[in-house]
Image: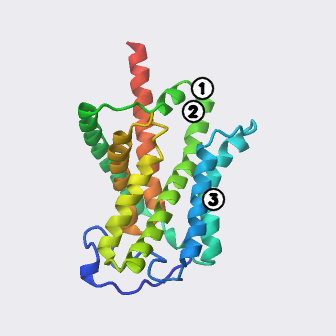
Amino acid sequence: MTSFISSPIRNEERFARLEDPGSDFPFYNGVPVSVSKGQWFFVMAMVVAGFLLLASPIDWPDGAFWKFLPAILMPGLPLIALAYVAPGYWKTIFGKVGGREVKLMFGFALLNIVVSMIVGAIVMALFGTTPNGTAAELGGLDTAGKIAFFAKTIPQLLGEEVITLLPFLALLQWFSKGFGMGRKGAIICAWVITSVIFGLIHLPTYDWNLIQCVVVIGSARMMLTLPWILTKNIWVSTGAHIVNDWLLLVMTLLGASLVGKV
């Protein structure tokens, strides 16, 4: 893995309790390498392309390879683009995975589930919510199908992190350099905007329920971005995302199984 030395950050520019000491985001301030506006535009185009390949109703051929291909291309295309504009340094968004990182994955996943349930309950009471059809689809699969479904979510959820956190870095650079905003303000703006966008891309999944997507899914995204802000390690936020979704799916399957036995 390529390592780099981040530029010094004054204490007042850092979220002391939200960021690991000595860590910083790559690229936005020219470290370890500068990425131009045009280069970021190319990366963002690949972010959109990766998402559309997964989300569009493309009639892929039968076979396990073709079923996994869109989920693999979702993170693959943006990462290839990042490797093209920042050769040798694209791996800086990844970090080591040890005991602390695994604990953070589970901790943030559980935190997100609690926050999502609270926010979801409030939104349901005030505006109503639309159920996610994924659980029903999963329940109709046989054992082999369920295993394949869970396996496919691994590259897909990495993809969701990639298409969220690469725009985060682009916006961080845009706000800090283009608008002369302070580091803290730029982080908050990038954090909120990418969370709202993440909610909006889930509109078709939740029958175009705007409030649910922006408030519930957006707040969940904010929680899942926290481990990225803390560690600058996309593996940690990806792991938290996988643990979060798998726990929710397993709980749904178990609940449906218990209801079926009553």
Residue 129 image position (x, y, % from top left): 34, 32
Which residue is the site of mark 2? 146
- As drawn, the label of residue 142 is 1
- What type is the residue that disc 1 sits on? Asp
Location of residue 128 with respect to 166 vertically, above or below: above
- Mark 3 or mark 2: name the one nearer the start of the chain: 3
Q: Is residue 90 visible?
A: no
| Badge 3 density bin: few <14, some 14–19, many ≥20, Cα 10 Å | many
Which residue is the site of mark 3? 76
Residue 8 image position (x, y, % from top left): 36, 87
Q: Quadrant of residue 212?
A: top left
Residue 93 image position (x, y, % from top left): 50, 69
- Mark 3 or mark 1: name the one nearer the start of the chain: 3
- What type is the residue that disc 3 sits on? Gly
Specify whether 7 is left or right of 42.
left
Asked whether the beta carbons under mark 3 and mark 2 sit within 8 Å of each other, the answer is no
Residue farthest to the front, as pictured = 179
* Residue at 36% over, 62% down: 191
- What type is the residue that disc 2 sits on? Lys
